[in-house]
Image (cartoon, rainbow, N blue to C red):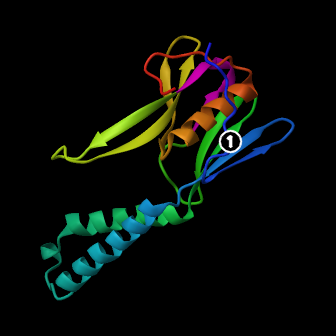
Amino acid sequence: MKDFVELGLPDKMDIKRQYNAMTITRKWFGWQVIFLTVFAVVWNGIIFNNYLSVEAYSELPWIHIIAGIAVTYYAITGWCNVTNIHVTKQQIQISHKPLPWIGNKTIDSHDIKQLCVKEKTSRNRNHNSYSVSYEVHTITNSGKVTRLLSGLSTSEQALFVEQEIEKYLGIENKLVRGELS
């Protein structure tokens, strides 16, 4: 069994406890969103200026236009969205709002044996820089490992989510091979 150290409330997170439920909320906004917004404005400005005079519809750089729309949507979600982790004794529900985003799910609480946190490192093509994010995984009673939540910017956020869900559901915190501790 791991030693249990009470974590404080991490940045960009909030928790509400009711008598029959708990909701952890994580805001998406951060410095990356500001950078992405500036990039989207510049990218779309270049596309708009360079192709404003293109008369033939087929000559438009559709891949660049689609990329500009995708980056813009991602930037807007960073300004607006939050992730809600709603926990009851029956289920855990992950939802991203107010704008639609992938990753919404519901998991049966009774099927969860353990939670663990994993670090995810992504390198760029040239391997000269990388980014780190954190994920919370569930381990079911049958041993299946499922990603519950991803894209957390700090280990404190991920460990806090793990700790609070385990505490609420009465799951004994045990060491899992490969988990962040």
Q: Is residue 52 left or right of residue 179?
A: left
Q: Position of residue 135 (x, y in %)?
A: 48, 35
- Nearest the viewer among 168 and 109 is 168
The magenta stretch is 105-116
Which residue has dot 1 on it?
A: 8
Write the residue at 12% across / 75% down.
59
Residue 113 falls within the magenta-colored stretch: yes
Q: Position of residue 80 (x, y in %)?
A: 56, 64
Element assignment for label 1: loop
Rendered position, 127 above or below 99: above
Rendered position, 101 above or below 149: below
Amino acid on which disc 1 is placed: Gly
Residue 127 sits in quarter: top left
Q: Is residue 181 left or right of residue 51?
A: right
- In the rendered image, the residue lying farthest to the right is 19
Location of the N terminus by quadrant is: top right
